[in-house]
Each structure stands twice: as structure tokens, then as C-alpha cells.
Image: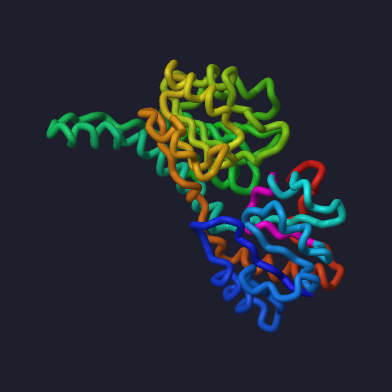
Amino acid sequence: MALLISIGHDGWYTEEQLAEELRTAAPGADIRPISSPGNLEDITVLAVSALKSDLPARLPNLKLVQKLGAGVDTIVAHPGLAPHVRVARLRPLEPAHEIAEYCLAYVLRGQRNMLAHAASQSRSAWEPLAPGRPAETTVGVLGLGHIGGMTARLMRDMRFRVLGWSRSPKEIEGVNCRHGDAALHQMLGECDYVCSILPSTPATRRLMNAETLAAMKPGATLINAGRGDLVDEPALVAALGKGRPGHAVLDVVSQEPLPADSPLWTHPQVTITPHVSGWHLGDALKDVVENYRRLEAGENLLHEVDRERGY
């Protein structure tokens, strides 16, 4: 039994760095980076950020794919992953805090008129603007799971009026929680900022389309730190021209890296960041080696995913 690490993309940890951290957490465990995989028949657990298309077929004894993060949409839908292979994700606190902070940073950028002040400085113009008041500002959070709930509570603690939306009923103290399709349009029309922390499922893909974008409050800001396929990007470009929303902050996009010829790069009402809102795994690395141990012992896994539901 061995655990193989294949990050699947550049710009984050390397496999060797992660293998070293995991070995520290589980001394003596057989943990291998993809650069030194050894006999692939030994591999029973595969730890990935993005699952490469050809990898499952090369691992005849694979039993578990451990996602090094929360989103598992591309893994559960992977055509080469045998039905018996289980999937687990992480529910780490550190990147959840980071994603909540990312959303707050861009809300505060708007509240404190930072873009306008930068434009004034470029003209050597002294142009005071009153900042927004939190109590008079409504922040909406789409998705009230582990990360979305943390985001909603952070906004609440910063004294914003907070609306939350989810598919099923949720309760968060101090947050006006709504659920179901019928409630979405009305909520969007009330929000000055909409933070999306939704997973990718058949029900959420292209949720922000021409119809729902048109329901947004004029001049509002859409912040997407969930999954790129939540947003219909051509519809977003058209909607920005109508001021609903007035600005979009996108940490995730439908194709990553974002192609150089995408109009999103140069659109004056779009801010792009390269999928950096949640970065560090923190103590969640312990869950990777714990699931490795539990699989061998025949025990229940941490944060196992229902592959039919996609989460």
C-alpha cells in the first residue's frame, strides 16, 4: 500500500514538498511524489489537486482519490475513474479563512473607494469620497457550507447586512438565510456585493447566467471564489455592459489558466486573480495521512464524497 502525490498543475506546492510534509505527519508511511512513483501496482491512494486524464488507468490497485482541497467536480466526473474508487476531499480551516478574507478584501476595496482613489492619484487630483457604511451595505453569500458559512459569519462580524443562499435550508446566527430557486432572484436584487462560494454540480453550473445576472442590483459587485463554471462568461460580459453587475472579481474561471485572448483580461469592469483565494492547507494535511491509515484499517473515511451527488 502506497500513497502517490500528483498535484496536476503548476504554481502551488510541488509534489516533493508535499511528500516531505506528509512524511513528517506520518513517519514510515510509503509516500511517493509522481517524479519517483516506483511500482505503480503498489499505489492504493492518489492525492491530487487536479486529476490528470491518463493517471487512473495506470494505477490498477487504486482505491481512493484524495483531493487536496474542497472541490471534487472534475474528479467525480472523470471518465477514467473506475466506479469502485472512492473519493474524499479536505475541509481545511486555513484556506477557508483565506477565501473568506479574499471576499472581504474586495468588498472593502469597494466600500473604501480604492479604485476611484487610485484613479484620482493617477491624475494628481485630490477628490475625497465618502466610504460606504457597513450597516447600509448588503453582502450576499451563495453557498453556506464550510467555506460559505465562514464567509457569511466574517461579513456579519464586520457589521454588514448579510444574506445567505443555499439549495437547502440553513441557519446561521445573524445571517438572513434563504434557500431554493425562487428566493435567488429576489436576493440578488438586494445585494451590493454577491460572493459565490458554491461547488460545481449540475444544479450550479451556469447559475449566474443572463437571467440571474439581470436580477442583480445595478452597480453591484460579483465575487466568484467558488468554481469557474458557476458563471456564464459571455453572458457576464454582456451583463457588465448593462451595469448588472457593475464589476466582477473572478478568482476562478471556466478555463484555467485563462487564455491570453479572453476578453476578461482587459475588460475595465473585471478583476482577475489566478485562483489564489485559498492557498495554504495547514492542519488539513493530517487528514490526508489519516485517510491513508483509515483506508488500510477498513475504517470510515474523513469527508468522503458521494460520487453520484458530486459533493
Judging depth in this view, the residue of 186 and 274 nearest the camera is 274
Q: Please determine whether, in this image, residue 177 is positioned above or below residue 49.
A: above
Would you say 62 lies left or right of 281 here?
A: right
Q: How is the image coloured?
A: rainbow
Q: Where the N terminus falls, by quadrant?
A: bottom right
Residue sitting at 86 percent across and 51 percent down?
A: 83
Q: Position of residue 135 (x, y in %)?
A: 42, 32
- Residue reaching furthest to the bottom: 28
- Residue 232 is drawn in which quadrant? top right
Q: Position of residue 7 (x, y in %)?
A: 60, 60
- Residue 84 is drawn in which quadrant? bottom right
Residue sitting at 58 percent across and 41 percent down?
A: 226
Judging depth in this view, the residue of 271 and 77 nearest the camera is 77
User: What span is in magenta?
Assistant: 64-73
Q: Position of residue 180 (x, y in %)?
A: 70, 27
Residue sitting at 67 percent across and 32 percent down?
A: 204
Q: Is residue 43 magenta?
A: no
Q: Please determine whether, in this image, residue 145 is positioned above or below residue 222.
A: below
Q: Please determine whether, in this image, residue 74 is positioned above or below residue 64.
A: above
Q: Is residue 70 magenta?
A: yes
Total count of labels: 0
Q: Position of residue 194 (x, y in %)?
A: 51, 31
Q: Please determine whether, in this image, residue 118 is positioned above or below residue 210.
A: below
